[in-house]
Amino acid sequence: MIKLLVIAAVVLLGFALVGAARGAFKDGFLVPLQRASGPKVSDHFVALALAALYTAIVLATAWNLGFMRDEGMYFDASKSYAGWFEKLLSADKAVRATAFEKAVVDAHWSPNSEHPSLMKSSFALSWIYLWKTWPEGLIELFHRSKLTYPLAWMVAGVAKLAPKLFTEESASFRFPGMVAGGLILYFVYLFASEVAGRAAAIAAVLLQAALPRPFFDAHLAGFDAAATLAWVAVAYAYWRGLRSMGWAIGAGVVWGLALLMKHNSWFLPVVFVVHYSWLAYDVLRARPGGPPTFDRRLRRLPVPWPFLFMGMFGPAIFVYGWPRLWFDTWARIDWYFTFHARHDYYNIEFLHQTYFRPPFPVIMVPFLVAATVPLATLLAGFVGMAARWRAILAPALPGRVAHVEDDRRTSFFLVFNFLLPIAIITHPKVPHFGGTKHWHPAYPFLCIFAGMGVVWVGTKLAEAIARRRDALATPRAPLLAAALVLITGCVVAPGALETKRAHPHGLTHYTPLVGGPSGGADLGLTRGFWGYETGAIVGWLKRHFPNGGRVYANDTFHSSWEQLRLDGRLPMNVEAEWWSVQSCDVAVIEHEQHMDEVEHQIWVTFGTVTPKYVVTLEGAPTLTVYVNPKSTKYVP
Amino acid sequence: MPRKGCGRNEPVIPGRSTMRPLVQALLCAALPLVAVGELALAQAQHAKVPTDADWAAAASAAKAAKKPGDLVIVAPAWAGPLGRKAVGEVDPTMIDLASVARSDLEAVPRVLELSIRGRDDPQTKGWRLTDEKTFGRVKLRTLENPHPDKLVRDLTDAFGPEATVSRVRDGVPEACRWEQGQTRMPGLFGGPSPPVNRFLCSPWDAGWSYVGVTTITDLSYTPRRCLAMHPTDGNVTTVTFPPGPVGKKVVAHVGIHVFLERELGRPPVHARVSIAGKEVAHALHKDGDGWLRFEGSTAQWAGTTQPVTLETWVDGSSQFRLACVAAQLRD
């Protein structure tokens, strides 16, 4: 699959180059495409190529990343859903019919019913067709109709190139999440190119790709990369839908799919209502140079068609796209919302204190943004916002000062999309857990501004250099390009370096601003969670327990451990154990403050405080391994 | 020009120059400088990460420098696994549960501290630095206690089958029985691991009604080696040590496992130390107190041999009141 993705990226870039040769980029790289003729097909090729490359990198680096607790649960749920899809897509009509029976639906869709269907369905389908039955399953499926014969031939052709798509089963579950991570870049490119031009779009994509925590999340069979994708995709469709009926309809469909990804998509209409109110106020007020009468100003107000289609399609897609809601619909929707409205508070450590319940410190989320997003990216985003402050705050400024950038008040829209995900979690009573992932939907918008900031600084730099020779000169294209490449490279480099170094321990990563991972440990910030670090000791276990052994796996979920064995990362004779630790050969502890008590229990149970192995990131321990002195299987 | 669509396009009305030239210049300069600075800082931090060889060299030097009575410690606390691994590989006897889960360093005359990132153990505040050697990114610091107490008897170390352990109700003792049982690991939010060597008291539940040496996790998530003495409703849990040497004072600590204390809503626990039947120190531990220090004078018995009694009891329900006491007789 990695090879296919790289080939796809190269081919797409080739198409883009052909397009460029035919004048696709004649608008240049600095002009916001919304003011020109909009993104060209070649822009889509560029954006998709970047998305494919990113997905390839994520897939290529997944082999040494262990499995989170939630991933284990989603593997289980996806396998259950896969059973339903196998009925639904069966060649036997009678079997297909059973897929619509309540008993069958409930039997397959009950596991993990607190999260909607789309991502786990995609994990299930990827597992069935890209792993278990590749390529025969798809070929057989596409051969059922003459219309889809070409697809069957295509699959057969691809299979010759790639007889096996993944090296391990888990990658097939994780692949849809990786694609979601890649598609975030696609939408960032489109959005940024329309708002600020292609150069800003490329910078924004690179900055988003080089964010360490989202890079980590993009590896997982989870909902977090998808939730970010959902947010940015719906925001983009809504924004386009204020000018285009087609996109307005698209906004409704995309929002429906977003609702099927994760519950935070229900907040999106709030963003749009606030934005549209702000926009309406600003358009309708009198200003110098604007239309003199209210009636004329009213005619300039975009019709909010996206709301209509979101209302029409969103809930319908949510219900029809989630088989569990086909029966006892209202009761199950009520249960779903009640579950999330009364979500458990999990623990999170902040500044040496573990919080088990609210109120959480208001400073926690902004602090963690500053501690996990590279400072250069934050500053570039700030520069991008500062360069547009009159547009962002337009309705709050006197008419003669305010800058009307476009009829959609785009800068405000972007800022609001950046701030709201952070603001929601900042509220002291909203559950804080899972590190920073819950506000990752803010980051594409930050990176769009950062792309603008990079271009703004690059342009100013080129202008300054040009004016050294001639006070009235404007920079020539090569100089401008060099300045943009230089500034983009400078600003992307810290994030790229930190992302590379942090892998595969991304949840231990902190930026140099707070001293890196060791600085995070000094400050008492969460060092890791949800048990994935056992993936980092498989090599050590194989070396020191060649004849197998039993491991107390601490916070690793049993299905997550099982996946290590199913993937062949661990031999089957290395078993996990949670209840009779005293008879285990090995006990591990993942370093999270509230887990300290378990480490102290291990000391008493094994009678030793001396670890045999410590997993670290930049000197900060993430997982410590103790060997039972009574073990007969340990080979030094 | 914007494309046609369902909205009517509004013309762009540019504002005036959005930023003053000085602000523009500052931002232009700041962005590349910050980016390069961040990159340089990341490199510098990366270069400061201690290697396994640094830890091993410092541990070997600690072994060479160690004298009887010295304690080997690691700072900062989060680097403990790395330091303990290195020290344990050189000599497993140099660092043990008693030293790692200590109550304090007041009775330790000298420590050898494996230190990174310029950190010291807070318990050595005010100590004299007498030697410092550097091994890559790890320092071996020799710190001397300016006013060390002299340890006369550590009651946690002294605990064994010769002690008398009972639950006392209205002055009537119910004896606990000595046993060598089986340990088990309770797991997260399960309290401390029960020790193998212990007294078992009524209601004879090996999961919690034992009296024995274990390690709890205190409210600040610090390990504390101590004598677990869970009181029961209306009973005083009592441990009497056979006669032994007594110094001028007793320094004790009492704490409750973090999971049982952090809710901050349960009844307080009493802990008392008596010499020859006379109370010398008494603490009332309320939730939120953490690892609570208390002390008393034993000067009137200094130099003599006396029995010592530790007691715990609770005002109210004893559920989840797994009090753990560590006491030392000192000069």
Image (cartoon, coloured by chain):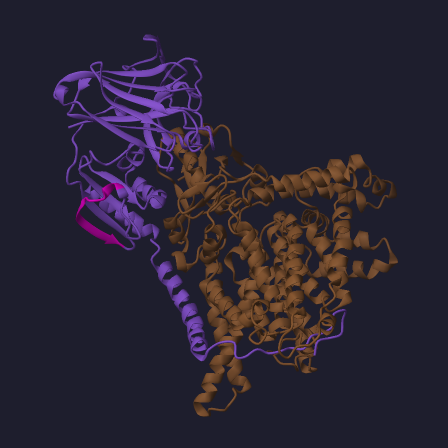
Of residue A489 and residue B218, the one placed in the foreground of this image is B218
Report the quarter where the N terminus of chain B lies.
bottom right
Q: Residue at x 56, y 51 (%)?
A: A424
Where is B212 relative to B117, above or below? above
Residue nearest the viewer, comparing A195 with A75: A195
The chain letter of the brown chain reads A
Q: Residue at x 42, y 41 (%)?
A: A593
Number of marks: 0
- Which percent across, then down, holds residue B283? 29, 25
Q: Where is residue A418, by image quadrant?
A: bottom right
Image quadrant assignment for residue B325:
top left
User: From this viewpoint, is residue A357 visible?
Assistant: yes
In the figure, A499 relative to A607: above or below?
below
Front position in the image: A365 or B189: A365
- Image position, residue A329 (x, y; %): 77, 40
Overall secondary structure of the magenta stretch? strand
Work out whether B82 lies above or below B34.
above
In the image, residue A263 sits, relative to residue A105, either above or below, namely: below
Say if the magenta span includes residue A445: no
Does residue A595 appear to the left or right of B5 in the view shown?
Answer: left
Q: Please give the name of the residue rendered at 74% of the width and 66% of the height, measured from the top-left corner.
A: A303
Magenta segment boundaries in residue numbering: B123-135
Task: Indicate the position of residue B152 as horizontal and vertical percent values.
Answer: 17, 26
